[in-house]
């Protein structure tokens, strides 16, 4: 018999809370034992990918006035995101923390989307798969566009599915920010228009 059988009259909120709690433990275990993971050890709570140095350098150049934000049309959203942390001289692990919080919010949006089209049990399974897929969750610790792009895509989808025209300004703002983060942003836009 399944734990999701209606006969047991379980509380979905409890299971959702449990998934989030285990996810936070999962992230903490990775944080403290990252040296033992093949993806690499964290340096002050942050991992750097091949493009991280470029993003950080250009964000500093924008802040110093050495380059124009318009020079990097394909990435200016992410450069501005990083420039915010650099301007206020915040350690980069605050950017990581922001990405983790945004992943938690997008997981809740994913739960609601899945619940709308399928059922609450499917929503729980979907959130668990999303939050415990190691290659995806490791991206939270990187200074790269991937996880922010995925999270904002899910949140944007949530706004489109649930609010349509009701919250048009936040939806358009999310779409513009999303398109400003990746060089392949037009493909995403055409996917929505199809």
Image (spheres, rainbow, N blue to C red):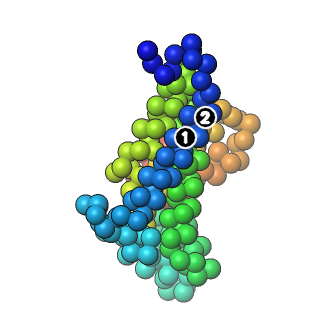
Counting labels gives 2
Residue under the point 46% across and 59% down: 28
x and y percentages locating residue 33 in the rendered image: 36, 64
- Quick one: label 1, few (<14), some, or many (20+) residues within 10 Å? few
The answer to whether 118 is drawn above or below residue 155 in the figure is: above
Snapshot quadrant of residue 112:
top right
On screen, residue 166 versus residue 161, left or right, reads right
Q: Quick one: SS at disc 2?
A: helix
Residue under the point 39% across and 75% down: 43
Q: Nearer the viewer, residue 146 or 64?
A: 146
Q: Nearer the viewer, residue 53 or 24?
A: 24
**CB contact under 8 Å: marks 1 and 2:** yes
Q: Quick one: SS at disc 1?
A: helix
x and y percentages locating residue 151 in the rendered image: 51, 49
Residue under the point 38% across and 45% down: 133
Q: Residue furthest top?
A: 7
Q: Nearer the viewer, residue 112 or 7?
A: 7
Q: Which quarter shows the N terminus?
A: top left
The answer to whether 157 is drawn above or below residue 95 in the figure is: above
x and y percentages locating residue 96 in the rendered image: 50, 65
Residue 7: in sight, yes or no? yes
Q: Nearer the viewer, residue 140 or 171?
A: 140
Name the residue beneath numbered marker 1: 18
Residue under the point 59% across and 40% down: 17
Residue 74: in sight, yes or no? no
On screen, residue 156 versus residue 167, left or right, reads left
Name the residue beneath numbered marker 2: 14
x and y percentages locating residue 128 in the rendered image: 46, 38
The Cα–Cα distance between marks 1 and 2, rounded to whole angstroms, is 6 Å
């Amino acid at each position: 018999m399944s734990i999701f059988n209606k006969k047991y009259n379980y509380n979905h909120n409890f299971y959702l809370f449990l998934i989030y709690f285990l996810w936070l433990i999962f992230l903490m275990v990775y944080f403290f034992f990252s040296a033992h993971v093949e993806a690499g050890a964290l340096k002050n709570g942050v991992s750097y990918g091949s493009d991280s140095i470029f993003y950080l350098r250009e964000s500093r150049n924008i802040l110093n006035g050495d380059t124009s934000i318009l020079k990097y049309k394909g990435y200016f959203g992410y450069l501005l995101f990083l420039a915010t942390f650099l301007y206020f001289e915040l350690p980069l692990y605050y950017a990581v923390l922001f990405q983790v919080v945004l992943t938690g919010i997008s997981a809740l949006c994913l739960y609601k989307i899945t619940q709308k089209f399928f059922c609450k049990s499917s929503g729980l399974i979907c959130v668990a798969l999303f939050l415990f897929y190691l290659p995806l969750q490791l991206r939270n610790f990187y200074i790269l566009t991937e996880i922010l792009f995925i999270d904002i895509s899910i949140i944007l989808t949530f706004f489109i599915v649930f609010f349509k025209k009701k919250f048009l300004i936040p939806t358009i703002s999310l779409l513009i920010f999303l398109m400003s983060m990746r060089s392949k942003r037009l493909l995403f836009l055409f996917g929505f228009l199809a």
